[in-house]
Amino acid sequence: MRVRRMMVPFLALLALLPAGCGGVAGPAVPAAAAPATASALPAVSASRTQPVVPAVVPDSLKFTGTTLDGKAFDAAKFAGGPVVLWFWAPWCAVCLGQASTVGDLAKQYDGKVAMIGVAGLDQSTNAMNEFVAQGEVGNVTHLNDQAGVVWRKFGIKEQSVFVMIDRSGKVMQNGYQDTVTLGKWVAYLDEH
């Protein structure tokens, strides 16, 4: 309880921090919510000879696209696991500043939390690829969302925005995250 009392002023201070390029309100921190119920987790077979029951694809993961390297992408393959969508633009200095944290978290939580970049607000695929190279986030899958289809699906109108999706497909957070809060969110999604 003492830790919780100490965290309240810290979290209040974080909420007052200014947002990045887009001017979105301060970061939200995952609440000490109850753990996900067993029904929210994908079914797993008890035996290796029995097939795993496929996860139901939630509406939040019903979208497709093309990656920056031209491959087909279907978000449905991430059903049953946590997903972080990072909406960025190649000319956004705040996005570039977040890139190393996103890349590090993608490595740390590889196979546990899917990190997906959604590049938009620019018509230049070359500029998007240069951003990935300069930000050293080639270990993250990036969508080329020049048409803004995925941006509109999640109501994104500015960058840098993160969308946190839990194992059940529920959007837990949609907004700007500083690098510290982003790390806390990814850890939370992994644990729940």
Image (cartoon, rainbow, N blue to C red):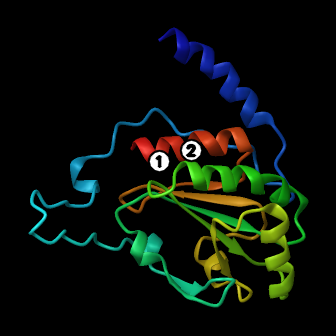
Q: Is residue 192 above or below residue 114?
A: above
Q: Is residue 95 above or below residue 142?
A: above
Q: Residues within 10 Å of mark 2 (few under 14, many from 20)?
A: many
Q: Residue furthest top?
A: 2
Residue 119 in picture, x, y percent from top left: 73, 75
Q: Residue at x 79, y 78 (%)?
A: 129
| Mark seen at residue 189 | 1
Viewed as shown, does residue 146 lie left or right of 74?
Answer: right
Viewed as shown, does residue 88 lie left or right of 182?
Answer: right
Residue 133 in picture, x, y percent from top left: 81, 70
What residue type is disc 2 on? Trp
Give the Cα separation between the discs numbered 1 and 2.
6 Å
Secondary structure found at label 2:
helix
Q: Residue at x 57, y 86 (%)?
A: 65
Q: Nearer the viewer, residue 70 or 33?
A: 70
| Mark seen at residue 31 | none
Q: Residues within 10 Å of mark 1 (few under 14, many from 20)?
A: many
Q: Residue at x 48, y 55 (%)?
A: 113
For residue 76, which quarter of the picture? bottom left
User: Label 2 belongs to which residue?
Assistant: 185
- Disc 1 + disc 2, Cβ < 8 Å: yes
What residue type is disc 1 on? Leu
Task: Assign the C terminus to one quadrant of the image.
Answer: top left
**Residue 22 appears anywhere in the view:** no
